[in-house]
Amino acid sequence: MIIAPVFDKNSKKALYIQLYEYIKSEITSGLLKPDSKLPSIREASSSLNLSKTTIENAYSQLVAEGYIENSPKRGYYVCDLSEYYFEINSKPQKSILSHSNETEYINDGVDKDSFDSSSWKRLYNKVISDEYTDIYSSGSIQGEKVLREEIANFVNTMRGGHTSPQQIIVGAGVQYLLGILIGIIKENYNTVAIEKPGFNKAEYIFEDYMFNIEHIAVTDNGFPVNELLKSNARLIYISPSHQYPLGTIMPVNKRMELLEWAYKNDGLIIEDDYDAMIRYGGMPIPCLQGMDKNDCVVYLGSFSKMLLPSLRISFMVLPKKLLTKYSLIKTRHTQSTSKIDQIVLANFMKDGYMLKHLRKIKRVYKKKSMLLTGSLKSKYKENLEIINSDSGLHIVCEAKTIKIESQIAKDAKKSCILLNIISHKKNRLVFSLNYSGISANDIHDFTVKLGKVLFK
């Protein structure tokens, strides 16, 4: 039997892999029949002008996978795979890696000039060279103690919370932390109330764990606590200090109503405080957790918007009554966030860089928000209204447009613009729009591109 592959000398694939793939293809296509004898290693080496090692490596891989067998003193033979069906696809396969479905949005992320990378590098180098860091161990499942201490201090002093390091769990993202929380509470809760519109990625986690979802529609007057009272839920996921995505703030009377509901119904409130520190008019709104006197609030926070989304460090503050249950399931999990990054962040906070950073980003994003809203008002006048822009890293707008919603969504993705459509009724489109990743110098061009998505 003659083997006549064509080798690509410039390919990154080793020659033995090319030979292995060629013979495998010949077998699965039926061109090499069962019990056909392959040339010996010496014969193949001579005819193909390849080393014996290359031939042997290719044959060994085929033997290991069961395509051929090595019969002592007889040679290599094709195995009988005729009872199995190999689908032959003559069409060239598209590379999964080179045709990714993920879109890099031009307005997502954070401002490239907002982060003090030089200080972070200096702290990073200090941490990895410090013998007490012990970078050779995986670290704490709950999160490094030094970081949990800094987070507790941050929540208490900057967010008006009331917590201790023992109540804090560190993890890579809110979704991961929700998975831990559900493991703690699933025996007592199976229905969750979620704001509509709200944070879809949190809702997906509850869906994955087979929770019943009850949507509570957020109105122009904010969150209707009375609708929650009518529901079957004793668990709610909510963002009271800066509702996502509408940007409304829950007033103190409704906060008290919500806390009373949780207390009287043995309920639990999951407070998502995703970007409440970034507020341009007045002081940041204190968190709900600090008002809780009955241990009913789970607090979620993240450094993705405050610092870098690529850092992937979030945290959860558990009520004290859940700590015992957490201790029982704690060892089921592994820490999902880098130990080194946790310690660097702890030093970043401890040494005052965080406060300096927060002051800087408020200036940066306030200026950017004003530039964007001004540009939108100037260019689109009566066709676009800014509904909310005084905090966070997104604005809420209403546009008058005759375009259908599906086409707007399609054009937005095609233009790499992250656009969250909230509602579309009678040619009026309400949407939220991130602006954190747009360079201040590109806001005019972005405004023009957005107009094409909304109106053309």
Image (cartoon, rainbow, N blue to C red):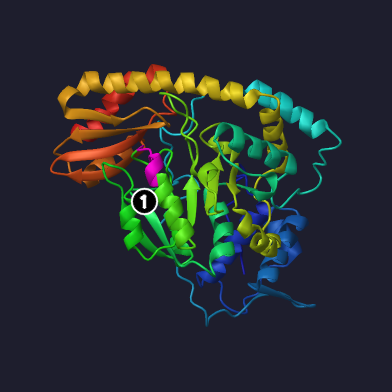
Q: Is residue 328 left or right of residue 174?
A: right
* Residue closer to the observer: 133 or 33: 133
Residue at 79% over, 78% down: 72
Q: Could you tell me the amino acid type at mark 1?
A: Glu
Place of residue 436 in the rendered image (x, y in percent of width and height, measured from the top left): 43, 29
Is 253 a magenta residue? yes
Place of residue 422 in the rendered image (x, y in percent of width and height, measured from the top left): 28, 44
* On screen, residue 309 above or below 329: above
Residue at 63% over, 72% down: 67
Q: Is residue 100 left or right of residue 169?
A: left
Residue at the extreme bottom:
83
Place of residue 398 in the rendered image (x, y in percent of width and height, measured from the top left): 23, 34
Provide the residue span drawn in magenta.
247-254
Residue at 38% over, 46% down: 254
Q: Is residue 96 visible?
A: no
Q: Is residue 399 visible?
A: yes
- The quarter of the rendered structure image containing the C terminus is top left
Q: Is residue 284 left or right of residue 406?
A: right
Is 190 a magenta residue? no
Give the residue number, with chain letter if any, for mark 1: 195
Residue 378 in which image quadrant: top left
- The quarter of the rendered structure image containing the N terminus is bottom right
Q: Is residue 242 left or right of residue 12?
A: left
* Residue closer to the observer: 340 or 285: 285
Residue at the extreme right:
131
Place of residue 417 in the rendered image (x, y in percent of width and height, measured from the top left): 35, 35
Residue 434 in which image quadrant: top left
Helix, strand, or loop for circle 1?
Answer: strand
- Magenta stretch secondary structure, dominant: loop
